[in-house]
């Protein structure tokens, strides 16, 4: 009887690990399937359907591609900074 319980426990654990190790689907808007909604002044944007109507840029300021970092800004500043002292 103990061998059957142990075998069932091992099978259940194998199933749990197999299901937990699968790669989840990519969310909408990831860099693999980014859907550009439009372009304003040469900058692509995505319309997320927010009630406010806010449009999100596909890149950070100063970046050429979605995976690039872009510039760094201090809170409330309008020009990029390199030193924050």
Image (tube, grey):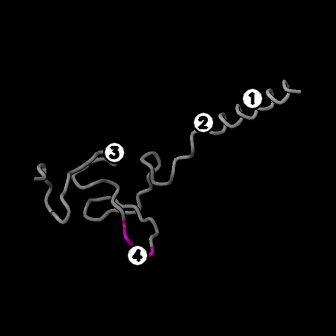
Residue 79 screen position, x and y as percent: 13, 59
Crowd around label 2: few <14 · some 14–19 · many ≥20 (10 Å): few
Vertical placement of 75 versus 6: above or below? below
Q: What stretch is highlighted in magenta?
A: 51-55
Of the numbered discs in the image, which one, if any, rests on residue 52? Answer: 4
Q: Mark 1 points at which residue?
A: 10
In x, y percent, where is residue 55? 37, 67
Query: In this view of the protein, which residue sits in the foreground, 35 or 27?
Result: 27
Gap between marks 3 and 4, in whole Å?
26 Å
Q: Residue at x 47, y 49 (%)?
A: 33
Q: Name the foreground residue: 41 vs 76.
A: 76
Q: Decide which of tag 1 and tag 4 comes sooner along the chain.
A: 1
The Cα atoms of the two marked residues, 2 and 3, are separated by: 25 Å
Is 23 left, or right, of 82 in this rendering?
Answer: right
Q: Is mark 4 on a helix, strand or loop?
A: loop
In the rendered image, residue 53 lying in the magenta stretch gets the answer yes
Q: Examine the residues drawn in magenta and state their main secondary structure.
A: loop
- In percent of the image, x 51 and y 51: which residue is there? 27
Q: Name the residue under label 3.
A: 67
N-term mark: 2 or 4: 2
Query: In x, y percent, where is residue 10?
Result: 74, 29
- Quick one: SS at disc 1? helix
User: How much space separates mark 1 and mark 2, taking CA atoms?
Assistant: 16 Å
- Of the 4 image quadrants, the one containing the N terminus is top right
Reading the image, the residue beneath label 2 is 21
Of the image marks 3 and 4, the number of the one nearer the N terminus? 4
Is 48 situated left or right of 76 in this image?
A: right
Distance of label 3 from label 1 (alpha carbons): 42 Å
Q: Residue at x 71, y 35 (%)?
A: 15
């Amino acid at each position: 009887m103990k061998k059957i319980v142990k075998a069932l426990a091992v099978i259940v654990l194998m199933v749990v690990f197999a299901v937990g190790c699968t790669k989840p689907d990519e969310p909408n808007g990831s860099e693999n399937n980014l859907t550009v909604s439009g372009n304003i002044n040469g900058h692509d944007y995505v319309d997320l359907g927010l009630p406010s109507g806010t449009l999100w840029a596909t890149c950070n300021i100063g970046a050429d591609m979605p995976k690039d970092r872009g510039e760094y800004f201090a809170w409330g500043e309008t020009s990029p900074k390199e030193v924050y002292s």
